[in-house]
Amino acid sequence: MIVTDSDVYWDPYDVEINTDPYPVFKRLREEAPLYYNEGHDFYAVSRYPDVERGLRDRDTFISGRGVVLEIIKSGMEMPSGTVIFEDPPTHTIHRSLLSRMFTPRQVARLEAQIRHFCADALDPLVGLDRFDVIGELGAVMPARVIGMLMGLPDEDALDVRRRSGAGTRRVPAGGGYGGAQEGEMFATAFERQISEFLDWRAEHPADDIMSELLTVEFEDETGTRRRLTRQEVGAYSSIVLGAGNETTTRLIGWFCKLLAEHPGQRRELVDDRSLVPQAIEEVLRFEPPAPVVARYVATDAGFQGQTVRAGSALLNLVGAANRDGDKFANAEEFDIHRGASVSHLTFGFGAHFCLGAGLARLEGRIALEELLTRFPEWDVDLSAAKLEPIALTRGWESLPLVIP
């Protein structure tokens, strides 16, 4: 049992807390840096060094049992090819297959197409006095980009985005996913849809990720030279399609809100676009799209002079670590001028560092540049905005921008 004198309470399923978790995160860092929630039976760490360790030490804190609390608690077996839910040696092998598809050079080649997708989304909005930036841009451009990379037509890529979002929604009261029956229906329909895409792509190969996954040869953990099974390709594709959408959608929503709240810094970006990349880094630090990352504790681990027993679920509070005052000066302030001093944990750390980080940064930079070109000023109508109850990420389902 964790010993603490604090009465601080944090519940990942509490809608009110999740609306603005940072006051609770601050108290956790200060009063209960190793926190235990008896009701949901999990531990949480919130200080930067502890969260970094929880993400870095892949032998003690494993991903093979899931990276969200619900999956860890379910005890379900992860299908092969679900890279973010794997441990070495399979994770190392499977990750290497994907990593060559997301090299800096490969990602940089996408700039013109990403800019085109942004223009397609934003040009029809010029002249309007308000629009939902998530519905018009945030949920559209990233889906088109990852769909293009995978080899899906636009309408199918957008449908996959809608399905993957619906399948990871949390019920507002009581937590968990959207009910066992709904979750099973989603999984069945999504698996069928991916299988149909794979069948078609197998007969019509092209220069895309799905075609490469179907034909790539590699040496597996047994030393056998083989191709990925159809199930593994399906798992890979599902992960890439889901992850390729969510982070950038959240990022776009958060930079719109934060820059509306800091119009002076937004004006600096309008006047000097060289500041945009570091502004994106500050948004990622200040409002990480995935503020909580879970791990299964494989062996006893010590934190803050106390022990977390093997078999426990450990929640790494990335959102809290990114605002740790011992790591960042004026950590609770949004400042686009942090520049090289930013070393946030938003994309993870070590072996599980996000493969799509470069793509998300590129998409975020271009989206912000294109938005500023057409709309140098905006306000946010928070009374009409809606946070989306997603298990893996935190961000906006709708975010109306008001154009002066």
Image (spheres, rainbow, N blue to C red):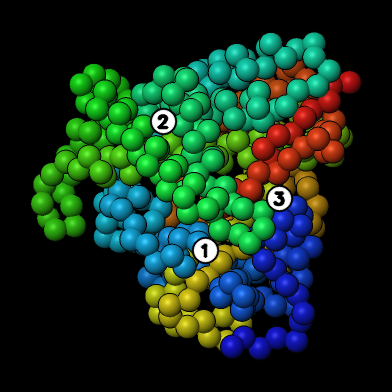
Residue 144 relative to residue 334: left or right: left
Numbered disc in front, either 1 or 2: 1
The amino acid marked with disc number 3 is Phe
- Kindly indicate the quadrant of the structure image that contains residue 251: top right
Of all residues shown, which one is farthest toward the left?
Answer: 224
User: Pointer 2 and pointer 3: residues touching (CB < 8 Å)?
Assistant: no
Residue 346's spot in the image, x, y percent?
Answer: 58, 52
Residue 393's spot in the image, x, y percent?
Answer: 59, 49
Q: Depth check: give the residue in front, 10 or 274.
A: 10
Say which element carries label 2: helix
- Kindly indicate the quadrant of the structure image that contains residue 363: top right
Numbered disc in front, either 2 or 3: 3
The amino acid marked with disc number 2 is Arg
Q: Residue at x 72, y 65 (%)?
A: 25
Q: Distance between the residues labelled 1 and 2?
A: 35 Å
Residue placed under numbered mark 2 in the picture: 105
Q: Residue at x 67, y 58 (%)?
A: 173
Of all residues shown, which one is farthest toward the front?
Answer: 181
**Which disc number belongs to residue 69?**
1
Q: How far apart are marks 2 and 3 (CA)?
A: 28 Å
Decide: few, some or many residues near mark 3? Use Cα within 10 Å; few <14, some 14-19, many ≥20.
many
Image height check: is 158 above or below 251?
above
Q: Distance between the residues labelled 3 and 1?
A: 23 Å
Residue placed under numbered mark 3 in the picture: 286
Residue 368 relative to residue 210: left or right: right
Image height check: is 171 above or below 312?
above
